[in-house]
Amino acid sequence: DQQVKQNSPSLSVQEGRISILNCDYTNSMFDYFLWYKKYPAEGPTFLISISSIKDKNEDGRFTVFLNKSAKHLSLHIVPSQPGDSAVYFCAASGGNEKLTFGTGTRLTIIP
Amino acid sequence: NAGVTQTPKFRILKIGQSMTLQCAQDMNHNYMYWYRQDPGMGLKLIYYSVGAGITDKGEVPNGYNVSRSTTEDFPLRLELAAPSQTSVYFCASRGTGFNQPQHFGDGTRLSIL
């Protein structure tokens, strides 16, 4: 039972355009959501998070949107840069110490 | 500030051998975690700890053991290595504040042959 789903295994975007990565969840108890970025041979790096009391959080080029009724969140990167090429993981937590991760989306920025 | 340090980075084991994956953090974090990542999959939680002397099972604990005698260290033990344990293992830690993110080490790539 996959509670956090990233249905797009890969995404290619032209440099300078917007990248939109999507994530769906099924557990209505989840109240904190995070995005991690992972380069090859490195550990995941925390990117941005959002609490369920908000519907948007921005940090520079990165914005996360949360639609609780649809159980859907998305990560927008604008403008996309070559260094953004990585695997992005969505993760969720439900008021406890543990995170549930999606399977990841490989983002490739085309110069 | 080193953050979360994992050793070794790579290891090849024979079936039935045992080994300990080391994890240390220097951020005085109470919470520590062990995950495995198989190809094309997300991270699966093996074990976690909310403080020294306290550990609990995650989603996939079979075949593994942990201990937490200090705040800094959280080793993961494989007693009888099996091919199904071939994976990349990540250790993470986080602080006790509300909604703190987990910080990850760079992983140990383990092959069981």
Image: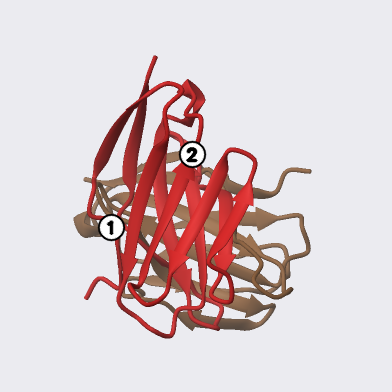
Chain colours: A red, B brown
Q: Which mark is residue B63?
A: none
Seen at 53% across and 43% down, the residue is B106
Amino acid type, callout 1:
Gln
B15 up-or-down from B1: above or below: below
Which residue is the site of mark 2?
Answer: A77
Res. A39 image quadrant: top left
A102 up-or-down from A3: above or below: above
- Callout 1: helix, strand or loop? helix
Seen at 69% across and 78% down, the residue is B52
Residue B112 visible, this angle: yes
* Chain of the residue under label 1: B
Q: Nearer the viewer, residue B6 or A89?
A: A89
Res. A7 image quadrant: bottom left
Q: Nearer the viewer, residue A39 or A61?
A: A61
Residue B24 at what x, y percent from top left?
66, 55
Which residue is the site of mark 1?
Answer: B85
Res. B103 image quadrant: bottom right
- Whether residue B88 sits left or right of residue B75 in the image: it is left
Seen at 35% across and 81% down, the residue is A27
**Mark 2 packing: few (<14 Cα in 10 Å), some, or many (20+)?**
many
Q: Nearer the viewer, residue A89 or B54?
A: A89
Quadrant of the rendering where the C terminus of chain B is positioned: top left
